[in-house]
Image: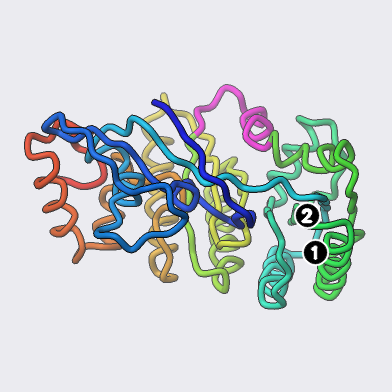
């Protein structure tokens, strides 16, 4: 696969791959190569095939080249970490930050179990409380202002000392816990299998959904740290379980059923980033059941012999 690049200006906040793809070259089921768009920054020409193929999880064609939107490197990047008394306090701080229009580039939530795992793995000493990791992009003046505004919001909701820095090395050290979160979680019980899953809910329901999920984890005795992309209501659970024990596998599957059901009941989605694949087919049916005939029609029209990732996303 090859990639070409088109210039861009503003940094994408909470963006996914779809946000940064301008055009694709795709080989279809009949062997034809098509181009989904030109290099222009925006277009209203025909159907949005670019995002259709990007979001199809490889079920509609083979992508052979991608034209990406480049983002400029900010003049200054600053970051910080702050712990909160409760998960609800942390989420309220996120909501207020967004409502105030503070252009935070990244805002990540780590729950108590995840912080405990990160402290042990990365030899850190963060308070074992719900913690937000934030990053600001801009000029020297704007990142200072943004950090100060966020610090005031954090304090309003009971946040502890806001460890903040614009020094690159110090910032990377602050973010070390988040960057190593997966391996830190695995180290809690390296003998167990790990299943990473995600859901996404409206930001206003994030605290409720994560708190209910944590209660579920405690009640069932799981090791399952939670990491959230708090700025868009998306959070991940790394479920550690014994995949050689039928009872434990059944218990894990029941937990996943409840997690996805909980997100859907809160007007969320069964996956914000990971995709459907095979594991979440039934949840997609619950979430977008009335749209599935349209999806199947697209699949049948573009891949009538079902040669691209058969059995993925939905039952045919």
In front of the other: 142 or 230: 142
Check the image and name the residue furthest to the left.
304
Left or right: 228 as drawn, with respect to 30: right
Give me the disc on residue 129.
Answer: 2
For marks 1 and 2 on the same chain, the one whose residue lies earlier in the sequence: 1
| Residue 198 belongs to magenta span | no
Q: In the picture shown, does residue 102 fall above or below 62? A: below
Left or right relative to 14: residue 255: left
Residue at image point 53% right, 55% down = 216
Asked if residue 130 lies left or right of residue 241, the reply is right
- The residue identified by callout 1 is 85
- Which residues, given as a range, are shown in magenta? 181-194
Q: Kindly identify the residue that appears in the image at 21 percent across and 47 percent down.
A: 314
Q: Indicate the position of residue 288 as horizontal and vertical percent values.
A: 26, 63
Q: Secondary structure at mark 2?
A: loop
State the SS at label 1: loop
- Picture quadrant where residue 138 is located: bottom right
Judge whether residue 131 can be spotted in this image.
no
Labels 1 and 2 touching (C-beta < 8 A): yes
Q: Residue at x 51, y 44 (%)?
A: 6
All told, the count of numbered labels is 2
Please say if 178 is above or below 141: above
Q: Residues within 10 Å of mark 2 (few under 14, many from 20)?
A: many
Residue 193, x across and y down, in percent:
50, 28
> Where, quadrant-wise, is the C terminus in this rendering?
top left
Tell me what residue is drawn at x 76 percent, y 39 percent. Answer: 177
Which one is in front, 292 or 114? Answer: 292
Assign the N terminus to one quadrant of the image: top left
Name which quarter of the figure residue 306 lies in.
top left
* Inter-mark Cα distance, 1 to 2: 6 Å
Closer to the camera, 250 or 226?
226
The image shows residue 141, relative to residue 95, as above or below, that is above
């Amino acid at each position: 696969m090859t990639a070409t690049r088109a210039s861009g200006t503003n940094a994408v906040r909470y963006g996914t791959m779809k946000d940064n793809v301008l055009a694709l070259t795709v080989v279809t089921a009949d062997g034809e190569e098509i181009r989904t768009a030109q290099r222009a920054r925006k277009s209203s020409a025909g159907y949005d095939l670019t995002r259709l193929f990007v979001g199809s999880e490889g079920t509609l064609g083979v992508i052979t080249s991608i034209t990406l939107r480049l983002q400029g490197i900010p003049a200054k990047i600053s970051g910080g970490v702050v712990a909160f008394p409760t998960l609800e306090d942390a989420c309220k701080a996120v909501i207020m930050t967004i409502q105030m229009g503070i252009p935070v580039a990244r805002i990540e939530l780590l729950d108590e179990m995840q912080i405990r795992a990160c402290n042990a793995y990365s030899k850190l000493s963060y308070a074992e409380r719900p913690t937000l990791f934030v990053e600001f992009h801009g000029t020297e003046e704007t990142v200072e202002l943004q950090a100060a505004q966020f610090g005031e919001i954090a304090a309003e909701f009971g946040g502890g000392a806001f460890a903040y820095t614009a020094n690159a090395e110090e910032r990377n050290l602050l973010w070390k816990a988040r960057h190593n979160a997966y391996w830190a979680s695995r180290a809690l019980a390296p003998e167990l299998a790990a299943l990473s899953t995600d859901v996404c809910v409206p930001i206003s329901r994030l605290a409720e959904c994560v708190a209910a999920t944590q209660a579920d984890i405690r009640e069932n005795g799981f090791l399952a740290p939670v990491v959230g992309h708090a700025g868009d209501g998306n959070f991940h659970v790394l479920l550690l379980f014994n995949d050689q024990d039928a009872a434990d596998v059944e218990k894990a599957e029941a937990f996943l059923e409840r997690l996805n059901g909980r997100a859907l009941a809160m007007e969320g989605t069964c996956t914000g980033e990971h995709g459907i694949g095979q594991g979440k087919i039934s949840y997609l049916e619950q979430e977008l059941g009335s749209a599935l005939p349209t999806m199947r029609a697209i699949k049948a029209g573009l891949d009538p012999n079902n040669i691209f990732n058969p059995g993925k996303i939905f039952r045919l």
